[in-house]
Image: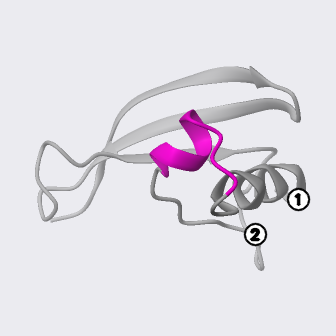
Amino acid sequence: GMATLESSCTLPTAEGTVLMQVYHDPATGPDKPWVVSSSGDLDGREGVLVRLHDACFTSEILRSVKCDCEAQLRESQRLI
């Protein structure tokens, strides 16, 4: 089946206000929602920047310097 939109809201961030959407895909199960953050009108646009992200607890929460996951996330948010 196809993913279905479950919820959405706007969220103010340091980079500007973004639209947050939560999707459910029967193929991945109820415990693995897709969370999409977007900015601006994407209708009919091609070549849109995207980033697939998996949470990095040590970098994003504990601020470890052993990896650059948080820096990658922040840079992608700035670009998108």
- Residue at point 68%, 22% (across, down): 11
Picture mark count: 2
In terms of depth relative to the viewer, which is nearer, 56 or 7? 56
Q: Is residue 31 left or right of residue 36?
A: left
Select label 1 or label 2 by which is in front.
1
Report if the CB atoms under discs 1 and 2 are less than 8 Å apart: yes
Identify the disc placed on residue 79.
Answer: 1
Q: Which one is nearer the viewer's eye here, 64 or 56?
A: 64
Q: Is residue 63 magenta?
A: yes
Judge from the rendering whether residue 56 lies leftward or rightward of residue 4; answer left or right: right
Q: Which residues are magenta?
A: 56-65
Q: Which residue is mark 2?
A: 49
User: Considering the image in quadrants, where does the C terminus appear?
Assistant: bottom right
* Residue found at x 55% / y 34%: 61
In this orientation, which residue lies closer to the viewer: 4 or 69?
69
Residue at (51% x, 46% y) in the render: 58
Expressed as whole percent of the image width and height from the top left, the position of residue 63 reads 65, 40
**Residue at mark 1 to residue at mark 2: CA–CA distance:** 8 Å
Type of the residue with mark 1:
Leu
